[in-house]
Every structure is written in C-alpha cells, then in structure tokens.
Amino acid sequence: MSSDADTSLPTPRIQLTPQEWRAKLSPEEYQVLREAGTERAFTGEYTDTETDGIYECRACGSELFRSTEKFHSHCGWPSFFDPAESEAVILRSDNSLDMPRVEVLCANCHSHLGHVFEGEGYPTPTDKRYCINSISLRLQPAEGSAS
C-alpha cells in the first residue's frame, strides 16, 4: 500500500508525482520508500553499522534518527529506540499482513521507513524498537567519525 493516497495523513511538505519519485530513486529504493516494501533481513548496509552520525531519509534528506539512539536488536534491520525528534516521523496503523503493526513514515515526504514495535522485551529506554529499512536511510557521519 502506498502512502501517497492516504488522505488521513497530514499533507507532506515534499510532494512529487510517482514519475518524479521514480526518476529520483533507484527501483529498489522506490519499492521500499514509495510502495511500502521491505528489504530482506540482514542485507541492509546499516544493520551492523556503528558509525556516529545522523540517519536521514533517503528520499528527501530529512533528519530521522541519530546513531546515539541506534542499538543492536539482532532482528536483521537497523534498530533505533527513538527518532531524532518526535515530529520527524509519522506513525500509522498497518494491517497489511493480517496482523496489527505500526508503520513508520518520514513526516516530510511520507516515505515508508519500516515499523515500530513496543514491549518490555526491548532493552531500550523507551521499550520501543524502530525497525527501519537500511535502503530508506542515508547516514551522514559525524565530523571525525570513521565510516
């Protein structure tokens, strides 16, 4: 399900046509970011990354997550316990696999990022795991960080 047609969401600050998104993104990026796809577990470039920096939306460049909130959940995707700012992402219900989940979208362009899971089983200060597709992100290393 594409987030482009969901009228219950606030209007994105960045609005491009599907053709414009296709010109901007690779086919793999488009499939995840604009069609709510998922990359295969343990294949993403940031799954095990420990570089300090800011994770931005690959579609629009908005700051989404910081390396200080990243942790190793061993789920196969980069995991964070909080977004950089609460307004950086939008959460919405997702029942696409006949099970209730919460989808995470970029607040700026409404691109699909992944899902957030909540529960006491996560070793985080928030009891949340933002399970995010690497292909939805671009890491901007902090000054002086090894990449």
Image (cartoon, helix red, strand yellow):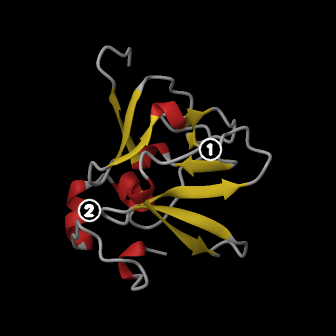
For disc 1, the neighbor class at 10 Å (few under 14, some 14 to 19, many from 20) is: some
Horizontal and vertical percent for residue 14?
23, 66
Left or right: residue 45 versus residue 81 is left
Q: Which mark is residue 136?
A: none
User: Residue at (73%, 72%) from the top-left corner?
Assistant: 99
Give the residue furthest to the right.
121
Left or right: residue 19 versus residue 33 is left
* Quadrant, the C terminus: top left
- Name the amino acid type tagged 2: Arg
Please tell me in which quadrant of the rendered image residue 65 appears.
top left
- Name the amino acid type tagged 1: Ala
Q: Secondary structure at mark 1?
A: loop
Q: Secondary structure at mark 2?
A: helix
- Does the residue at mark 1 contact the one at mark 2 (Cβ under 8 Å)? no
Please tell me in which quadrant of the rendered image residue 21 appears.
bottom left
Mark 2 or mark 1, which is nearer the start of the sequence?
A: 2
Horizontal and vertical percent for residue 79?
58, 41
Q: Nearer the viewer, residue 81 or 7?
A: 81
User: Residue at (64%, 32%) from the top-left corner?
Assistant: 72
Mark 2, residue position: 22
Horizontal and vertical percent for residue 103?
55, 65
Give the residue furthest to the bottom.
7
For disc 2, the neighbor class at 10 Å (few under 14, some 14 to 19, many from 20) is: some
Horizontal and vertical percent for residue 71?
61, 33
User: Residue at (38%, 14%) from the top-left corner?
Assistant: 146
Marks counted in the figure total 2
Mark 1, residue position: 41
What is the spatial separation of the Cα atoms under label 1 and label 2, in whole angstroms?
24 Å
User: Residue at (22%, 55%) from the top-left corner?
Assistant: 24
